[in-house]
Amino acid sequence: MTGRLNIIIAILGILISSGCHRNKASDPGKTESDLTIEINGSLEGCNGNQIVLEQMGAREFIPEDTVTCNGSGSFNITFRGEEEAFYVLRYGAGSYVTLLLKPGERVDFNGISGRTDLYEVTGSPGSELLCDLALEHKKTLNSMGEISRKNMELISSPDYVTLKTDLDRKFDSIAASFYDFSLEFIYQHPASLSILVALYNLYGQGLPVFDPERDFHVYQFVDSALMSSHPGFEAVRLLHAQVEEAKQIIKNDNQHPPLQKGEIAPDFVSSQPDGNELALSDLKGNYVLLSFWAGWSRLSRDENRTLKAAYEKYKQQPFRILQVSLDDDMDIWTKAISEDGLKWDHVSDLNRWESVVVDIYRVEKIPSNVLIDPEGRIMETDLLGDRLLEKLESIFIK
C-alpha cells in the first residue's frame, strides 16, 4: 500500500480547522422552536468574561453569538440551527470545547474558566459523546506528556537506556489503551458524527491514533456507517471520496508487486538542480544507492547523516549515491542539499508523490532506498541507518 494513502489524514484539517457543515434550505415543516438551539451555561471563575460560539463552516469559523457571563458565571446562548453541525465554544484564555448540536436541542453546559479537562454537557447526545472522547483524549495526552518530561529529566542518567525502555513501554501502553477506547467508541456509535473526531484524533503532530495504512479498515467502517446515516454532510462526503481513492490505490498496487531482489532496476531520467538531465543508467558500473527523500522530511534529513558517513568512507570505491527528491519547491530542495552538505548526485521532477519515479519504484515512505549492483540489478531495499553501513562494509571491505 503506497504512502500516498496518508492523504486521508489531510481531511483532519478540513474537519477540525476549516469545518464540516454544508448549508441547506430549511425544512418548511419545522417550526421556529424546532430549529432553535439553546445553551445554558455555568462557568466557575467566569465573572464578566466573554463566551464565543462559532460554527465550523465550510471554509471558516462562522460566529453565532458572543455573550458575557453574569456575576455568578452563568450565560445563555440561543440561536437558530438549520441542521446538525459542529460548533466551538470558546471561553477563558485559549480554552475551547467542541460541540455537536442539532436543531431543537436544549443544552446545559458546566465548566471552569480556563480549563477544558473538566466540563460537563447534557441535553445534546452528540456533544455528550464528544465530551467523553475529549476528556479521555486529554487524559491520554497528559499522561504522554508526563512520560516525555520524565524522559528529558533522565536523559543524562547513566542508566538512561534501561530507563528509556521502561518509559517507552509505558508510553506504548497508554497509546494502546486510547486506541482501544477510540475503536470501541467508533463501533458503539456508528450513526453519530462524533466518530469523525475519534477517527482523526492525534497523539501529537503527525501521530494519528488510526494510521491510514495500518487501520484502513477503521476508515472504511466510518465511511460506510456515516454514508448511510449522514450522506449529505460535507466531511462525510470528503471522507468517502478519500476512501474510494485509497481503494483504487490499493487495487493498483496489488497489480504491481514490490520490486524483487535480482531483477533489473528500472531506468529513468530526471532533472538535476542545474536543469541538466541524469539517467540512472548513467551510473551503471557502480554500486548505486538510489535514495528517496525530501527537504521537508525531518526523517529524511536525519538519515542524510548516515548517507554522508557512507559517502565519505566509500567515495573512492565504485560507489555512487543518487538521491531522488519528493519536493515540489526548488528552493526547499536545493537549500536542504546545501545545509546537509550532500555532495553526490541529485534529481527531482518536483512533483512530490506524483513523481513518475515514485510509481516506478513503488515508494511508500521516505526515507527509503534501493541498493543496485554494477550490473544494474537490485541487491537490497530499505537499508537505513546501521544496516546500510554494515551492507556496504560487507561489499567493500574484504
Image: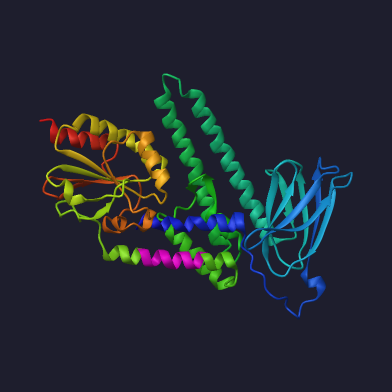
**In the image, is residue 256 above or below residue 372?**
below
- The answer to whether residue 245 is visible is yes
Identified at 38% across, 55% down, the residue is 351
Which residues lie in the magenta part? 239-249
Q: Quadrant of residue 130?
A: bottom right
> In the rendering, at what x and y percent does residue 317 appear?
14, 34
Residue 57 in the figure: left or right of residue 91: left
Residue 268 in the figure: left or right of residue 358: left
Identified at 69% across, 61% down, the residue is 125
Identified at 83% across, 52% down, the residue is 67
> In the rendering, at what x and y percent does residue 315 appear?
19, 33
Identified at 31% across, 36% down, the residue is 342
Whether residue 129 appears in magenta in the rendering, the answer is no
Identity of the residue furthest to the bottom in this view:
29
Q: Quadrant of residue 160?
A: top left
Per the picture, the main secondary structure of the magenta-coloured stretch is helix
Residue 393 in the figure: left or right of residue 201: left
Q: Nearer the viewer, residue 291 or 350?
A: 350
- The answer to whether residue 185 is visible is no
**In the image, is residue 111 above or below residue 188?**
above
If the image is split into quadrants, where does the N terminus sit?
Answer: bottom left
> In the rendering, at what x and y percent does residue 257 appear?
25, 60
Q: Nearer the viewer, residue 105 or 58?
A: 58
> In the rendering, at what x and y percent does residue 148 appear?
52, 32
